[in-house]
Image (tube, rainbow, N blue to C red):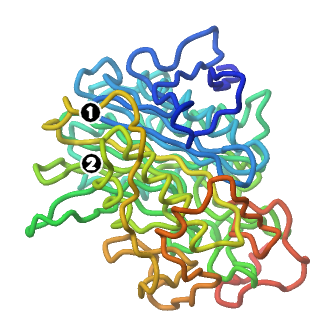
């Protein structure tokens, strides 16, 4: 498949997502593959909404928006199927990688998904491996696919095993396509992906990287509570670190950011990737980095209300609980994703006033249909910001990231909590009233950690954290 770019048809004026007069919530994106309209057939790849979902993304202060997202209704020609996902690119060409995966992955998945528990598809072998990989990559994939089968076999119903197989194959094929792509350099560029397929009352989620899916449901007291459906696949997770070290990669954190474990080459302090799985980043694919997704299943109940898919630009500053409360308090379902991104942007200024805001992308998928007919087709003139108190919460320690008791976090966080650095004492309400054009420059202080460090910061000496430094791999 050739190179896919996404462009937005806009007026000559620069698009301002916070200018309600210029904001077209039904904006249409075009994939340049012979003029095919991405939004045809129930697909939305930009800011927009439908009867069951809303999407919104906003560029941060770090440069090009490297986040991408998609909603595809009646997926794979199934009237009750929906595909949605968010993708967080990183590296010099991360924006191209995330959009390429966004455009190609659902199409490839639809061709791989056959409702038959038996038989091979498209000539690939039983484990979904394809030609063109190095022996080290094949060994890593075979090892981890086997581990994944052992962990997930008892949780996914048998009727969805073909879908699971299709997801594994599709993720593998997309990574291979990126490796041989003539126009996108993925040596040190890549993307995360968290994808969700809803069919009837079933959810199947595939996750690579540190984007996240969170379910909002009602407990026995009818209170809205979050259920984290995915695990943030960071290098500090024991199973991820063990795999990386087994294949001679290294995991350690720099001394100036001891809470951020990174993946490094065996004999060179580069590239410093802050996630354990990703599409692309082929400089690390021989050393433990994989694109094999974690796959999760959830059966929808009457208490479940909606699912949030979002990139780490949201989760770095808002807890799961705060995120679902913001979505639930939005004035309409069409504005929920925008309200969440808006609050995350203000929270960045509150928590990290000397840092540049990260890109944010959000998909809100509603699971109940009782209010679907009331969903407006355009965004409201005013988006109300629910009150979210971020100050003086006891869980504000680790990496300055707000945590909720139901969030899935590595054990290391409970053992070694860190005191939050540079947290402002202003309320979120004060940040919300901050003018939009106010610039927050990283030159004023220490910048928040990036997903990828192309070269070690400060110097190449022993500036590593003793808590995360790993022994030199055997040669």
Q: Nearer the viewer, mark 2 or mark 1?
A: 1
Determine which quarter of the picture holds residue 348.
bottom right
Query: In the image, what residue occupies the spot 64% across and 14% down?
Result: 33
Residue 440: give x, y in percent of width and height: 72, 63
Dot 2: element: strand
Position of residue 179 relative to residue 220, above or below, is: above
Residue 286: give x, y in percent of width and height: 71, 55
Which quarter of the image is occupied by the N terminus?
top right
Query: In the image, what residue occupies the spot 47% across and 91% down?
Result: 415
Residue 375: give x, y in percent of width and height: 26, 33
Residue 13 lies left or right of residue 219; in this view the side is right
Residue 350: give x, y in percent of width and height: 57, 72
Residue 342 lies left or right of residue 16; in this view the side is left
Query: In the image, what residue occupies the spot 77% across and 52% down?
Result: 283
The front one of 272 and 57 is 57
Q: Residues within 10 Å of mark 1 (few under 14, many from 20)?
A: some
Query: In the image, what residue occupies the spot 42% across and 44% down?
Result: 382
Q: Residues within 10 Å of mark 2 (few under 14, many from 20)?
A: many
Query: Does residue 301 appear anywhere in the picture?
Result: yes
In this figure, what is the number of numbered marks? 2
Estimate the spatial distance between the alpha carbons at disc 2 and disc 1, rounded to whole Å.
14 Å
Dot 1: element: loop
* Label 1 sits on residue: 375
* Label 2 sits on residue: 306
Residue 467 lies left or right of residue 213; in this view the side is right
Q: Earlier in the sequence, mark 2 or mark 1?
A: 2
């Amino acid at each position: 498949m050739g190179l896919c770019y996404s462009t937005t048809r806009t007026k000559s004026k620069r698009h301002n997502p916070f200018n309600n007069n210029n904001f077209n919530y039904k904006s249409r994106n075009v994939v340049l593959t012979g003029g095919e309209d991405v939004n045809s057939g129930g697909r939305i790849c930009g800011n927009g909404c439908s009867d069951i979902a809303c999407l919104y993304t906003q560029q941060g202060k770090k440069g090009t928006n490297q986040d991408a997202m998609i909603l595809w209704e009646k997926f794979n020609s199934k009237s009750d199927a929906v595909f949605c996902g968010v993708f967080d690119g990183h590296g010099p060409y991360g924006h191209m990688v995330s959009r390429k995966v966004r455009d190609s992955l659902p199409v490839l998945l639809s061709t791989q998904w056959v409702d038959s528990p038996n038989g091979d598809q498209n000539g690939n072998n039983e484990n979904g491996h394809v030609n063109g990989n190095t022996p080290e990559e094949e060994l890593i994939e075979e090892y981890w696919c086997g581990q994944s089968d052992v962990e997930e076999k008892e949780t996914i119903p048998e009727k969805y095993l073909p879908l699971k197989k299709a997801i594994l194959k599709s993720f593998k094929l997309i990574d291979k396509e990126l490796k041989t792509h003539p126009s996108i350099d993925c040596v040190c560029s890549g993307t995360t992906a968290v994808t969700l397929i809803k069919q009837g009352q079933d959810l199947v989620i595939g996750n690579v990287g540190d984007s996240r899916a969170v379910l909002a449901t009602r407990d026995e007291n009818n209170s809205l509570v979050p259920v984290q459906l995915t695990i943030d696949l960071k290098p500090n997770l024991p199973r991820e670190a063990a795999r990386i070290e087994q294949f001679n990669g290294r995991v350690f954190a720099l001394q100036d950011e001891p809470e951020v474990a990174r993946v490094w080459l065996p004999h060179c302090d580069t590239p410093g990737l802050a996630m354990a799985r990703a599409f692309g980043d082929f400089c690390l694919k021989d050393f433990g980095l994989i694109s094999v997704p974690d796959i999760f299943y959830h059966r929808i109940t009457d208490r479940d209300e909606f699912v949030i898919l979002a990139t780490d630009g949201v989760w770095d500053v808002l807890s799961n609980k705060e995120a679902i409360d913001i979505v639930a308090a939005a004035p309409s379902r069409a504005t929920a994703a925008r309200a969440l991104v808006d609050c995350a942007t203000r929270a960045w200024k509150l928590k990290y006033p000397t840092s540049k805001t990260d890109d944010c992308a959000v998909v809100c998928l509603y699971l109940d249909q009782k209010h679907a007919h009331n969903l407006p087709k355009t965004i409201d003139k005013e988006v109300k910001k629910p009150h979210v108190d971020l100050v003086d919460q006891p869980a504000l320690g680790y990496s300055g990231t707000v945590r909720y008791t139901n969030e899935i976090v590595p054990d290391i966080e409970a053992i070694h909590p860190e005191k939050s650095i540079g947290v402002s004492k202003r309320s979120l309400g004060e940040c919300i009233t901050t003018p939009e054009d106010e610039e927050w420059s990283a030159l004023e202080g220490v910048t928040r950690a990036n997903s990828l460090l192309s070269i070690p910061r400060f110097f190449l000496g022993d500036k590593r954290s003793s808590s995360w430094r790993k022994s030199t791999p055997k040669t």
